[in-house]
Amino acid sequence: MNLRFILIFLVLDDYSVGISSQNCRNDSSENSFVYRRVCYFANWAAKRHDNISRLTPEDIDPFLCTHINFAFAKVLESLALAPYEEDDAHGWTGGPGMYERVIKLKEKNPNLRILLSEYPGAKDQGAEAHTKRGYTKLVKKLSRTFEKEASLTGKEKLLLTCATAAARHRIEAGYEVKEICEYFDFISVMTYDYHGSWDGKTGHNSPLYGMKKEPKKFREWNVNNSMYVWMDKGCPREKLNIGLSAYGRAFSLYGEKPTKRKIGVKASAAEAGQYTREAGVLAYYEICEILQKDSSARIFWHKQMSVPYISKSSLWIGFDNIRSITVKMKYLKREGFGGVIIWSLDLDDKTGEICHEGPFPIFNAAKRELSKITDNDDETNDECSENKTLTSSDHSNNSSIKNNHHPYSIIFMASNSVNNYGDNDNDDQISNKNNEYLKTELVSKLLKHFLPDDKSSRLATDTVKLFTELLFLFITETIERSITQAKNDGSQTVNIEHIEKIFVQLLLDF
Ligand SMILES: *[C@@H]1O[C@H](CO)[C@@H](O)[C@H](O)[C@H]1NC(C)=O
Ligand SMILES: *[C@@H]1O[C@H](CO)[C@@H](O)[C@H](O)[C@H]1NC(C)=O
Ligand SMILES: *[C@@H]1O[C@H](CO)[C@@H](O)[C@H](O)[C@H]1NC(C)=O
Ligand SMILES: *[C@@H]1O[C@H](CO)[C@@H](O)[C@H](O)[C@H]1NC(C)=O
Ligand SMILES: *[C@@H]1O[C@H](CO)[C@@H](O)[C@H](O)[C@H]1NC(C)=O
Ligand SMILES: *[C@@H]1O[C@H](CO)[C@@H](O)[C@H](O)[C@H]1NC(C)=O
């Protein structure tokens, strides 16, 4: 009984949300399009000694990513791929190696793709000058070989992808863009590390846009510009992934006094984080800790660059949070890019115990926004909810109230796209698309909503999954019946009251 009540509530509650209909992207591919979420798994992170910073393959939610990039493998002189760490291929005590443990995630999510990542070279990193043309040749050859292998074995073609430079001079020096984009399945642009302690002054790790008064040298150093460089050189948008970071870059200002000018202030690398232990770099969860320990530390929003930073006496941190990730994902959808690549799983708050924003808040923020098929695209009024600890300018409890709204927006998406019914004459495509989005969204949202305690949610996963599947079936059936009814009525849109009635009727029948 309780269950029924909740379900109805989920649907009813959503009507207060304004409905706007707008498709995010050109979606003419044969299957419903799912934005890629390529996540980096760092093999060394699995070997850390404390359980805050350690991330093992078993810690990864199998539905968080569409692809996992295993970092790193190496290429031998013979051009053979080889493991970096001894325990990648075989566990130290005879157990499964790290590769096998990551691949095991596919048992739960067969659609997950696992990739081996090789660290890219550059002229100043030991690569040779003539490699630009050679690189294209190599990529072409690999692509052809993968195709051949697929046709010989009847297996799905292996994916060929790369993580590439974001700076124009590197792109121009390193790649024949148009050609390589043809052979790669997708290209992930590392749109982070634009600024760091090496600049000798404060600057943001990953600004979405540039700012007005910026030194000429830095004018192109932002996500938007890098993506445009790739596009302008002939790479198709849908093959490009935007790079996101689950870390920030931190500076120690020379003058103790906070200055008005926050960016471009003389500074050096800030002290290393307690867990990640690299000067000038802080994991997202380490940034959460800084905010929690020091109630006077505030987050500022840089309007022009559309990213947050923290400025507190001599400490300056440029980073990404739920808000900026959400803004970047709205940008991604507007521009029609194919997905994201995120560095790296171990730097996010894996259990949600530190930041109190749920497990993997950064990765989930990207997933949440990319799973929405409609979008009112209002960046100042986005649904991007943040915990109050991360919106230090807002000390009300209202942000946590907002958080509880997420499960409802799932239904909102469904009804929304049913409203779009008249725009598209392929019913199957509509419902397939919905199914895909609803399914992944529901699994994670409902887990969180009904079992907010992480430990219990782990214990009860099977139950929750069953429940989720059930709800999913109800919704699918509701949508299908609604579309049929609308068609029978000769209507171009589905009446929201009909949806409600059908849904309630299904529940009562059940
Ligand atoms: C959508 O994509 C298809 C194929 O990729 C292309 O032919 C078509 O022109 C695109 N439509 C729009 C509106 O961009
Ligand atoms: C971390 O590890 C220690 C010892 O291995 C254990 O006692 C503790 O419960 C663990 N903490 C968490 C949050 O898992
Ligand atoms: C994004 O970059 C392109 C190319 O440089 C530029 O034309 C456009 O104005 C930029 N968008 C914003 C919002 O800055
Ligand atoms: C926020 O919530 C806490 C605990 O739930 C409560 O003590 C406090 O009064 C609330 N503050 C506001 C502004 O509502
Ligand atoms: C919190 O939300 C309530 C109702 O939504 C509103 O009346 C109140 O002003 C809000 N408080 C703050 C501090 O924003
Ligand atoms: C936000 O953080 C506080 C403490 O940091 C925590 O008690 C609260 O449950 C969190 N709220 C949400 C919605 O995660």
Image: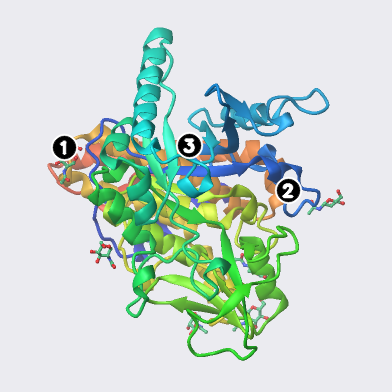
Residue highlighted by disc 3: 510
Q: Which mark is residue 425?
A: 1
Indicate yes or no: mark 1 CB to ligand 1 under 8 Å: no
**Type of amino acid at the residue the image marks with label 3:** Phe
Residue 117 lies left or right of residue 272; in this view the side is left
* Left or right: where 27 falls relative to 296: left
Tell me if residue 506 can be seen.
Answer: no
Q: Which residue is drawn at 66% across and 38% down?
A: 57
Sort mark 2 into few (<14), some (14-19) or many (20+) by Cα contacts within 10 Å. Answer: some
**Of the residues shown, which amino acid type is indicated by label 2?**
Arg
Q: Which of marks 3 and 1 is in front?
A: 1
Picture coordinates of residue 410 (x, y %)? 42, 51
Q: Position of residue 174 (x, y in %)?
A: 38, 44
Q: What secondary structure is marked by label 2?
A: loop
Beta carbon of the mark 2 residue lies under 8 A of ligand 2 = no
What x and y, as percent, mark residue 256?
Answer: 65, 88
